[in-house]
Image (cartoon, helix red, strand yellow):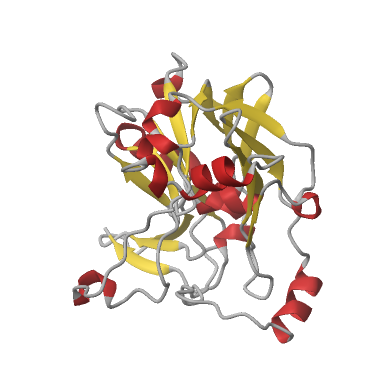
């Protein structure tokens, strides 16, 4: 295959990157030329029996994440695969249609016509939300914590489910443990001195491409890809979703002690003390 190599790079932003490169695994529509498509070349030249790859994103640093070429790893799956066809594969994205999005008991008006789309993207660390829906979704997923605690991990505090209906019985559901910012926000009223602790979602506003993704594009980034093991079928142009078989806390702790791999760019541990905002 053909690759692009850099012999000299600017300090900004590449000076802060610790990874060695980017391996693009989109469909051929995203490749400059078919010979630049890694999986496309693997598929054509090696006569793969199963022209797909599976992706597992670990919750624990002690357990390495995994990508499997030429099939998927059933040991990483906690449920049967459910498949959704790729929408407009000529654009090259692993993109699926969204029939509806529900937060708690409210179905978002933005997707009521069934014309929203979502791209499964391993390179996005947050859940991407169309900008015009982000404020409403923040409101629906926010929760007030009683008793004004001094410390709290919002991932462990109850909240509404966020459900993506992809049609044909395929529904993907995120809970507060998936979409929440770990650190809460303490809102202090300047006039009264009163305060309340709020748990919020961690969302990334997305301005969709007018020609390719459109204005109603969601990005299924790390929050969803940690909960679901995903399989990308290159031949049939479809994406499979299964609940991921994540290690339990005891297994993860044991694996951390015996870890032989290096974790680059891990975010610092979130402080348990709520950040303070005065209004």
Place residue 47 in its image quadrant. top right
Q: Note whether 16 is above or below 229 in the view shown.
A: below
Residues 12 and 142: in front is 12
* Residue lying at 71% horizontally and 41% vertically, measured from the top left: 242
Residues 143 and 17: in front is 17
Task: Return the residue found at the far front.
Answer: 45
Query: What is the count of numbered marks?
Result: 0
Task: Return the residue found at the far bottom.
Answer: 257
Counting from the top left corner in percent of width and height, residue 137 is at 43, 37
* Residue lying at 54% horizontally and 77% vertically, measured from the top left: 263
Counting from the top left corner in percent of width and height, residue 173 is at 63, 38
Q: Note whether 3 is above or below 79 in the view shown.
A: below
Taking the image as shown, residue 270 lies to the left or right of residue 209, namely right
Counting from the top left corner in percent of width and height, residue 91 is at 37, 31
* Residue lying at 66% horizontally and 29% vertically, measured from the top left: 83
Q: Note whether 65 is above or below 219 in the view shown.
A: below
* Residue lying at 40% horizontally and 27% vertically, measured from the top left: 90
Place residue 10 in its image quadrant. bottom left
Taking the image as shown, residue 42 lies to the left or right of residue 16, namely right
Counting from the top left corner in percent of width and height, residue 40 is at 50, 42
């Amino acid at each position: 295959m053909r690759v692009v190599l850099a012999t000299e790079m600017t300090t900004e932003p590449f000076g802060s990157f610790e990874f060695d490169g980017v391996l693009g695994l989109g469909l051929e529509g995203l490749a400059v030329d078919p010979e630049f498509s890694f999986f496309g070349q693997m598929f054509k030249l090696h006569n793969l029996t199963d022209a797909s790859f599976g992706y597992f994103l670990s919750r624990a640093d002690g357990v390495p994440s995994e990508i499997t070429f030429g099939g998927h790893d059933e040991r990483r799956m906690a449920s049967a695969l459910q498949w959704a066809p790729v929408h407009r594969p000529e654009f090259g994205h692993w993109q699926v249609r969204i029939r509806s999005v529900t937060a708690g008991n409210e179905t978002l008006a933005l997707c009521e016509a069934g014309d929203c789309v979502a791209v499964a993207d391993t390179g996005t660390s947050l859940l991407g939300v169309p900008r015009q829906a982000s404020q409403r979704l923040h409101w629906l997923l926010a929760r007030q914590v009683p008793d004004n605690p001094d410390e709290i991990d919002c991932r462990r505090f109850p909240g509404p489910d966020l459900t993506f209906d992809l049609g044909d019985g395929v529904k993907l559901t995120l809970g507060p443990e998936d979409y929440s910012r770990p650190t809460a926000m303490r809102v202090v009223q300047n006039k009264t001195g009163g305060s309340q602790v709020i748990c919020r979602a961690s969302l990334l506003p997305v301005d969709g491409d007018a020609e390719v993704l459109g204005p109603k594009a969601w990005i299924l980034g790390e929050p969803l890809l940690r909960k679901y093991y995903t399989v990308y079928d290159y031949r049939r142009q479809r994406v499979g979703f299964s609940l991921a078989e994540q290690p339990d806390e005891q297994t993860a702790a044991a694996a951390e002690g015996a870890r032989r791999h290096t974790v680059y760019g891990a975010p610092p541990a979130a402080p348990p003390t709520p950040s303070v905002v005065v209004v």
